[in-house]
Amino acid sequence: MKTTKTTLLTLAAGLALSLASAVHAADAPAAAAAPAATTASAKPKTAQQEKMATCNTEATGKKGDERKAFMKECLGAAKVTQQDKMKTCNADAKTQALKGDARKSFMSECLKNKPAA
């Protein structure tokens, strides 16, 4: 009787280890693929990052203060503040003689539009 219990316990332990190994082996390829999937679905570059890349490419060959001045000019050139947009949109609405809901709708669309850089 004692030998039967020992044999059954040994078989159960062996079966448990086999199942654990099989489950772990099945999960390993999925875990290895997870980091690759994360890098593959990287976020697209923002407008600022694209601008920085473009300016960096154009600054090739420049060094020191010359490069610093160029980068400052290049990166700051296309900035349009909300206040500047408001002035431009207001002037356009006034030129078109818009009033009421038509003006409100025009201003909303005008302020949403991104400036051509």
Image (cartoon, rainbow, N blue to C red):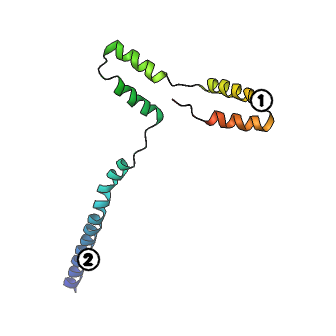
Within-10-Å neighbours for mark 1: few <14, some 14–19, many 20+ = few
Report the residue at 43% width, 19% height from top: 72
Classify 36 as above or below 29.
above
Image coordinates of residue 83 in percent, x first then y, are 64, 24
Disc on res. 20 = none
| Of the pair 100 and 67, the residue shown nearer to us | 100
In the image, 28: left or right of 49? left
Which residue lies most toward the right here? Answer: 100
| Of the pair 91 and 19, the residue shown nearer to us | 91
Which residue lies most toward the bottom here? Answer: 1
Q: Are marks 2 and 1 in contact (CB under 8 Å)?
A: no
Q: Which residue does the numbered mark 2 point to in the structure image?
A: 12
Q: Which residue does the numbered mark 1 point to in the structure image?
A: 97
In the image, 107: left or right of 55? right
Which residue lies most toward the top here? Answer: 65
Image coordinates of residue 74 in percent, x first then y, are 44, 22
Classify 45 as above or below 3.
above
Please tell me in which quadrant of the rendered image residue 51 appears. top left
Report the residue at 65% width, 25% height from top: 88
At label 1, the amino acid type is Ala
In the image, 73: left or right of 5? right
Q: Nearer the viewer, mark 2 or mark 1?
A: 1
At label 2, the amino acid type is Ala
| Of the pair 22 and 72, the residue shown nearer to us | 72
Image coordinates of residue 77 in percent, x first then y, are 49, 22
Q: Which of the image's four quarters has the N terminus?
A: bottom left
Image coordinates of residue 97 in percent, x first then y, are 77, 29
Please tell me in which quadrant of the rendered image residue 52 appears. top left
Give the Cα separation between the discs numbered 2 and 1.
87 Å
Secondary structure beneath dot 1 equals loop
First along the sequence among labels 2 and 1: 2
